[in-house]
Image: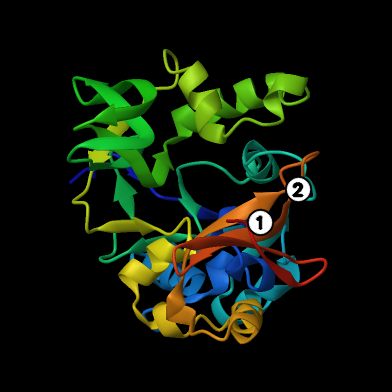
C-alpha cells in the first residue's frame, strides 16, 4: 500500500537568535535552554522529534552557541553555526541549513508543544496556526481552499502563525532558489524567512495546519512564561533579577511587565524596563543600576 505524502527527512531547529525581548533571562541563559515545567525547552522538542521517528535533527546555533554543544553527545544531533546571527534576521539560519533541507520541519527553539505535533510523514508543506478570539497583533492568515493566500500583521478573530512549519522537497527547492538570488541584497538582511515566503506566496504554496490554542506556546517575555509556569513568579534563577530585588528590597513576584531596552544605534538589548509598585524602573547591564523612570 502506497503511503501518501512525504517521508520527513529531518528537522531544523533554529536556535541562533538572542531573544532580546525575553530580558533579562536571555542575557544570562539562552531561551531555548531554560526549564519549562521541569523540562529544558530544546530537549523537550528534540525528544518529541525522536519519538516521531525523525532521526536527523539539526540545530542552527549562534548566540551562546557553546551552551548547546552537549546535545551532540546526549542526542546525536548535528550543530551548524550561523556566524551572522547578530547581524541578520532568521533568513540567515535558513541559508546556513540550505544544503540539508529536503522534506524538513522548520522549528523554533522557543516553542512548547503540550502534545507531540510531529510525524514521520506529512502530506505537503504547511505552517502551524492557532485561532485568536478577538484582536491580535500576530501574523494573521487569509485562507483559500486550505492554502495560505495572504498574511497580514494584526487582525480580529483570525488564525495566526504560531509554531513549526513543514517544507516538502518541491517547496524547499523553490524557496532556496529564491533565497540564494536575493540573499546579498541589502533589503534581505532584516527579513524573517517568513517574510520572504509571503513576498513569494504565489509560487510558494503552503497549507494552514490548525491547532487548538492550548497546544502551542511561545514565550516572548518573562511575563508570558510566568503565566504558563508559575515557578517563575518567585524563582526565575536570574542573578540580575535577584540583584534588582536586593536593591529595591522586594520579592521577585513584585516585579512585572519586563521590557527590553535597546541601544539607539542597534537592536541590541542594553537592559530592561519593569514595573514595581505601579512605578516604572530601568536597569542597564553595563552599570548595574536601578533607576526610577516615573
Q: Is residue 118 visible?
A: no
Residue 206 at what x, y percent from top left? Answer: 35, 28
Q: Nearer the viewer, residue 3 or 73?
A: 73
Q: Nearer the viewer, residue 144 or 293?
A: 293
Residue 266 at what x, y percent from top left? Answer: 77, 41
- Which residue has dot 1 on it? 18
Q: Are marks 2 and 1 in contact (CB under 8 Å)?
A: yes
Q: Residue at x 24, y 45 (%)?
A: 3
Residue 176 at what x, y percent from top left? Answer: 60, 29
- Rounded to the nearest whole Å, what is the CA distance between mark 2 and mark 1? 8 Å
Q: How many marks?
A: 2
Q: Is residue 120 visible?
A: yes
Instruction: Say which quarter of the image contains residue 208.
Output: top left
- Which residue has dot 2 on it? 86
Q: Nearer the viewer, residue 7 or 31?
A: 31
Residue 93 at what x, y percent from top left? Answer: 65, 45
Q: Nearer the viewer, residue 257 or 131?
A: 257
- 10 Å crowding of disc 2: few (<14), some (14-19), many (20+): some
Amino acid at each position: 500500500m502506497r503511503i501518501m505524502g512525504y517521508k520527513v527527512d529531518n528537522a531544523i531547529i533554529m536556535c541562533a537568535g538572542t531573544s532580546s525581548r525575553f530580558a533579562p533571562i536571555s542575557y544570562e541563559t539562552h531561551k531555548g535552554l531554560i526549564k519549562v515545567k521541569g523540562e529544558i525547552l530544546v530537549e523537550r522538542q528534540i525528544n518529541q522529534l525522536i519519538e516521531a521517528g525523525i532521526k536527523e535533527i539539526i540545530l542552527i546555533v549562534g548566540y551562546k552557541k557553546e551552551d548547546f554543544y552537549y546535545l551532540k553527545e546526549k542526542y546525536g544531533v548535528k550543530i551548524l553555526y550561523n556566524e551572522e546571527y547578530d547581524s541578520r534576521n532568521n533568513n540567515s539560519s535558513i541559508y546556513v541549513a540550505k544544503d540539508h533541507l529536503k522534506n524538513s520541519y522548520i522549528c523554533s527553539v522557543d516553542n512548547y508543544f503540550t502534545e507531540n505535533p510531529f510525524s514521520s510523514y506529512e502530506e505537503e508543506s504547511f505552517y502551524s496556526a492557532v485561532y485568536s478570539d478577538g484582536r491580535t497583533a500576530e501574523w494573521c492568515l487569509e485562507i483559500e481552499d486550505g492554502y495560505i493566500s495572504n498574511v497580514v500583521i494584526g487582525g480580529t478573530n483570525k488564525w495566526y502563525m504560531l509554531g513549526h512549519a513543514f517544507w516538502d522537497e518541491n517547496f524547499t527547492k523553490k524557496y532556496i532558489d529564491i533565497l540564494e538570488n536575493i540573499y546579498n541584497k541589502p533589503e534581505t538582511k532584516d527579513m524573517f524567512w517568513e517574510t520572504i515566503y509571503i513576498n513569494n506566496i504565489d509560487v510558494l504554496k503552503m497549507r494552514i495546519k490548525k491547532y487548538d490554542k492550548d497546544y502551542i506556546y511561545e514565550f516572548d517575555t518573562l511575563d508570558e512564561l510566568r503565566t504558563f509556569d508559575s515557578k517563575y513568579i518567585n524563582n526565575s534563577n536570574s542573578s540580575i533579577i535577584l540583584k534588582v530585588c536586593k536593591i529595591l528590597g522586594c520579592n521577585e513576584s513584585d516585579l512585572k511587565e519586563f521590557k527590553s531596552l535597546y541601544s539607539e544605534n542597534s537592536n541590541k538589548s542594553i537592559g530592561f524596563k519593569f514595573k514595581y509598585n505601579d512605578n516604572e524602573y530601568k536597569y542597564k547591564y553595563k552599570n548595574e543600576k536601578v533607576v526610577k523612570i516615573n
